[in-house]
Image (cartoon, helix red, strand yellow):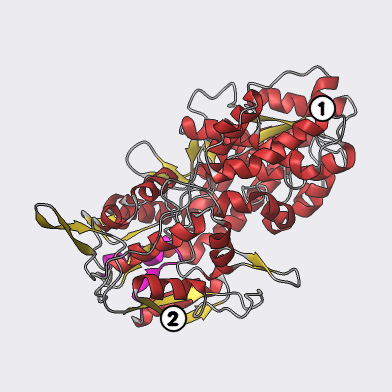
Amino acid sequence: MMKKTSRVLTALLASAMLLSACSGGGESSTASSTASSGATSTADESGSSETFDPMAKYDETITVKLCGSMNSADDYDGYTIENSPWTEMLLNDYNIKLEYMWTVGSADDYRTRMDLAIASNEMPDIIHTANYSQFDKLARAGRLKDVTGMFEEYIRPEYQEFVLQANPQALEYGTYDGVTYGVTVAGPNYNNGRMVMIRADWMEELNIEEPTTMEEVIEIGKRFVDEGLATYALPLNKDVMITSDMCDITAVANAYGAYPKIWIDDGNGGLEYGTVQPEMKDAIRVYADLYAEGYIDPAFASLDGNTVAESMTSNQFGIMMGPFWLITWPLNSNYELDGVTWNCYPVPASETFDGKMLQQVPAASGAYFAVNAEFDHPEALFKILNAVTDKLTDPDPEVQATFHSYQKEDGNSVGIHMLNPLGEYIGDPRINPETNTHVTQAIDNNDESYLVSSHDILQYPKVKQYFDDLEAGVKPSTDNWCMYMLFYGDTSCYAIINDYLSNDSYISCALNGYTTDTMNLQWENMKMNEDQYVVEMISGTRDVESGFDEFVSAWEDMGGTTIVEEVNEWYKSR
């Protein structure tokens, strides 16, 4: 369903993800030295000394074997993953020649091929695992190079900060018995922290104040229905458990201290599965009661996300609970057609919950970068990672046209960044929340000196134009309205995310992508059974009290008891 957002979201946020400015990001990636060790000899008045240059060019060309992915359906204007500005830059600037053992066209194919490569021991020099289980298997088998200290030694300090901000456990999960075998640059998707969005016009019409508890949120939804403004109190579709982002039960569950479909700390040094914990019963009961009272669409179990999205833009709902991108789709349609705007608030806790309110976000992919134990240049991984990040965070338009994307004469866009040899780069996880702060200060003070990064400078004119149009009595464009909703004021989407980040209010799956042997055999069936039970409890075909106990028992019998043991054996052995 996220693909449906791409037309609007790409235009609005591509710069936020790939043009983020950061200290040092515009440095030249070409080193003057040709010392293969990274040591550069320099001289001062007292004689000669040796300084370390982590980006020094190799004095002789080294070949690095990789595995990669490239969608052949995309237009790369004649470039390939084996022959692109990326391969040219690495060879010319660093004497690093890339050689691909194989390439595939999709993430699923990549995971399958990497599994085969691991089984056959036909591994590349620099390994980008598809998930954490692949990395864990290689590390425990002694098939990876010891890279202890290389992250700190080679990765630029500002990039190190970004990695650890995005995922404080990035190095911990790559380290076994004090030896580091890999690092990830991906963290939980903090941008997808859920928030409560309520129709501003209906709140004003009914003189409704900001909700401070989840019970108040639900009462507002019910009142919209009772007053004849909305058809249903809350949206819901057949993917009730986290998979839909915008019409699942996750925000309500979190308000009761329940965390569906993820593994969380059990308070005793181990992990437990969130959906089978007693707090989930309270969240399910909320929806079961709403359904019984007619406040939930009786056909929800047969609806997909696109169908519910259409109903959101036809005045059937006045409350949404989901991530920032709801503003860019489908709620932008409400504004485009009817000028409808929304008030955004943090998801509040239930009045019955006395713990810390945590927002559940998608976990990091668990993909790790590592080096084949037989490869002689482990530092090459970190050099390439620096070089890739330098290019994709450089605000220079010419650099971006070369390494990120450009438009051909026929109007087609060429996404050269998709040929990035590592498939990832180190981004600033706080770039959007920080831009919210800077743009708001610049608008409120009519002073552009508050703008710090190139991303600030990019978004500011759109937000300013929104206010200029309002002052002129002209309806602002939909794009500028989206930027206003995302980046201006204390109640904008990114202000709420900034608040979540500042208060360490996130939780994600502690497995980090690891799966046990029993999970590999049973988990898909267990997930389907889990979803079916929850749908049946909400729709009243199963009693919530007895049905939840039956579900937990069935989950344990299907393999849950064994999986808990396996998960904790792995977790405590790290």
List the residue tagged with mark 2.
100
Quadrant of the drawing holding the N terminus: bottom right
**At 50% from the left edge and 22% from the top edge, which residue is drawn?**
354
Image point 61% across, 57% down: which residue? 528
- Decide: few, some or many residues near mark 1? Use Cα within 10 Å; few <14, some 14-19, many ≥20: few
Q: Which residue is mark 1?
A: 471
Q: Secondary structure at mark 2?
A: strand
Residue 319 at least partly seen: no
256 magenta-colored:
no
In the rendered structure, are the residues bearing label 2 and label 1 in contact, judged by CB atoms less than 8 Å apart? no
Is 134 included in the stretch rendered in magenta? Answer: yes
Q: Amino acid at mark 2?
A: Tyr
Pick the front one: 175 or 16: 16
From the viewer's side, name the closer residue of 56 and 480.
56
Instruction: Indicate the amino acid at tag 1.
Output: Glu
Q: Residue at x 64, y 50 (%)?
A: 13
Percent x, y of residue 124: 37, 77
In the image, the segment drawn in magenta is 123-141
Whether residue 46 is visible here, answered yes or no, is yes
At label 2, counting other C-alpha atoms closer than 10 Å, the crowd grade (few under 14, some 14-19, many 20 or more) is some
